[in-house]
Image (cartoon, helix red, strand yellow):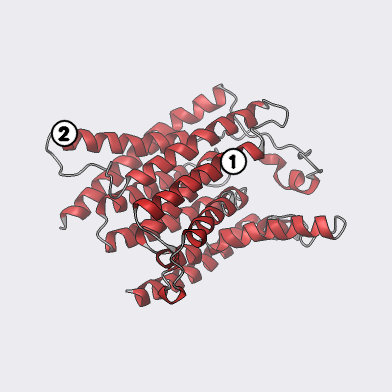
Amino acid sequence: MNLHLISIFSFWILTFLVAFLATPFYIKMLKDAKLWKQIRENALTWKATEFFKLHKNKAGTPTMWAWVLLWAVFFMVILSMILQWFGIINNSLFSRNETYLTLFTLWTIWLLWAIDDFMNIKWIGRTKWLSWKFKMIWLTLFATMWAFWFYYKLGWNIDHMLNTPFLALDIWLSFIPLFILIIVGFSNSVNITDWLDWLAWWLLLFAYAVYWYITFDQEMFLLSTLCFSIVWALIAFLWFNVKPAKFYMWDMWSLALWANLWIIAMLTNTIFVLFIVWAIFIFETLSVIIQLTSKKLRKWKKVFKIAPFHHHLEAIGWKEETIVFRLWLLWLIFSISWVMFYLLQK
C-alpha cells in the first residue's frame, strides 16, 4: 500500500479515537459548568418569535464541543512532531510548505470566537458578546495579512485565484480586496446554515472530504492528512449528535473551519471548486442578505418568513429531516459538478 495512504489512515484513526473517547467526558464537563445554549425570543434588534417557537426545545443543549476538535487536531500535530524527532516518520504535520498557514488560521480564528462564545453563553457584556465591529475588524486584519502573504510571499495574483489567465489582472488592487471580501463575506456561512441537526456539519464534512481528495491528488500529502483528520473528528462529533443533538459545535469553529478551507482552496488553486461545494452555504448567506435588505428598503417587508432559507422551509411546514436530506441531495448534485469541473481543469 502507498506509504502516504498508510500515514493518512493512521492519523485519522488516532484523531477519531481521541475525539470519540474525549467527547463523553467533555459533555459531562459542559453540563456541570452549565455551558449550554439559551434560546432567547428577544434578538438584539427585533423579536425572534417564530425562531423561538421552532427551536425552544433545543435550549439547554451543551455547546463549545469544538474544543475537542481542537485538542484532537493539535494532538495529532504534536504527536507527528515527536515521531519525526525520533526518526519514526520523515515529515510532521507541522510543515511550512503545506500546513503552517492552515494550522495558524485555525488557531487565530478559534481564539477570538472562543472568547465570543463564552461571553454569549454566560451573557457577559452589554450585547452578550464581543461587538460585531470588533470581530469584523479582527477578521479583516487577519484576511488582509493573509492576502498580502499570498500576493507578496507566494507570488499569487488574481489569475491564480480565479484560474482564468485570460483576465490578465496581475495587480494587487484586484487580488487583495477580492481575497478579503470573500473570507469576510462568507465568514458566518456555516453558523448561518446551522440549527438543523446534522445539516451544516455534514455539509462541512463533505467539503473537507472533497479537499482531502484534491490535496492527495496534488501530492500535498501532509495537508491531505490534516483534511482527513478534520473529517474524522467531525465524524466523532456527528456520532454523538444523532437527532436530537447532544451538543453544538458553536460559532468559533464554524468560522475557523471556513477560513481554513478557504486557505486550502488557495493553496490548491481550486477556488471555483470551493464555490461549487460551498454553494448551499453561499445561498443560505445570500438569503440572509436578501432578507435584511428587503426589511431595510421595503419598510420591514420580508421576502422569507424566517432567514436563513432553511428556517423559512421550517416555517412553511417542512419537517427538519426533510430539509436536511434534500439539501444533502442538492450537495450531491453539486459534488458531481465539481468532479467534472476539477477533471476538466487537469
Q: Quadrant of the C terminus?
A: bottom left
Packing grade of label 2 (10 A; few <14, some 14-19, many >=20) is few
* Residues tagged 1 and 2 counted as in contact (Cβ below 8 A): no
Seen as rendered, the residue at the extreme top is: 32
Q: Helix or strand or loop: what does disc 2 sit on? A: helix
Classify residue 86 by image quadrant: top left
Q: Quadrant of the N terminus?
A: bottom left
In the rendered image, residue 213, in percent from the top left (x then y), is placed at: 33, 61
Q: Helix or strand or loop: what does disc 1 sit on? A: helix
Q: CA distance from mark 1 to mark 2?
A: 39 Å
What's under tag 2, amino acid-wise?
Trp
Classify residue 316 by image quadrant: bottom right
Seen as rendered, the residue at the extreme left is: 87
In the rendered image, residue 139, in percent from the top left (x then y), is placed at: 54, 43
Q: Is residue 68 above or below residue 48?
A: above
Of 200 and 100, which appears nearest the observer? Answer: 100
Packing grade of label 1 (10 A; few <14, some 14-19, many >=20) is few
Residue located 68% across and 34% down the image: 38
Residue located 52% across and 42% down the image: 141
Of 146 and 212, which appears nearest the observer? Answer: 146
In the rendered image, residue 70, in percent from the top left (x then y), is placed at: 41, 36
Count numbered badges in the picture: 2
Q: Provide the residue designation for mark 2.
A: 85
Left or right, 169 with respect to 300, comes to left
What's under tag 1, amino acid-wise?
Ile
Left or right, 35 with respect to 210, comes to right
In the rendered image, residue 42, in percent from the top left (x then y), is placed at: 79, 38
Q: Is residue 231 above or below residue 20?
A: below
The earlier-in-sequence mark between 1 and 2 is 2
Look at discs 1 and 2 and give the one toward the viewer. 1
Q: Provide the residue designation for mark 1.
A: 137
